[in-house]
Image (cartoon, rainbow, N blue to C red):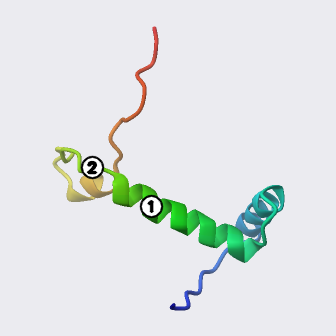
Amino acid sequence: MKKLTIYLDNDEQKILEKRAKRNLMTLKEQVEDIIRRSCVSSKNRTTKRPLKADDRLIEIFSRQKSGRKKRK
């Protein structure tokens, strides 16, 4: 097990503490849960076709639309 240090501003900390309280967890447990869930969900994702863009940064930081299509 490795240690990891993260820096949160006061607003972020308040939001996480509120969420942890709602989930009956400590702040540390809540952060661990968020990271664990993120790792599990990214493990199960299938690779999608890459976004075609002229700028490499746009490709890196852009999301592709996913989920249900909007009803008209």
Left or right of 54? Residue 41 is: right
How far apart marks 2 and 1 lie (CA) works out to 12 Å
Residue at 27 percent of width and 58 percent of height: 57
Left or right of 72? Residue 54 is: left
Residue at 69 percent of width and 67 percent of height: 30
In the displayed structure, would residue 71 be above or below residue 60?
above
Residue at 73 percent of width and 64 percent of height: 16
Three-letter code, disc 1: Val
In the displayed structure, would residue 64 be above or below residue 17?
above
In the displayed structure, would residue 8 be above or below residue 56?
below
The mark found on residue 40 in the picture is 1
Q: Position of residue 66 (x, y in %)?
A: 37, 35
Residue neighbourhood size for the residue with mark 1, other residues' Cα within 10 Å, grouped as few (<14), some (14–19), many (≥20)? few
The mark found on residue 5 in the picture is none
Q: Position of residue 25 (x, y in %)?
A: 78, 67
Q: Position of residue 43 (x, y in %)?
A: 36, 60
Residue ranking furthest to the top: 72
Out of 11 and 1, give the one closest to the viewer: 1
The residue carrying mark 2 is 46
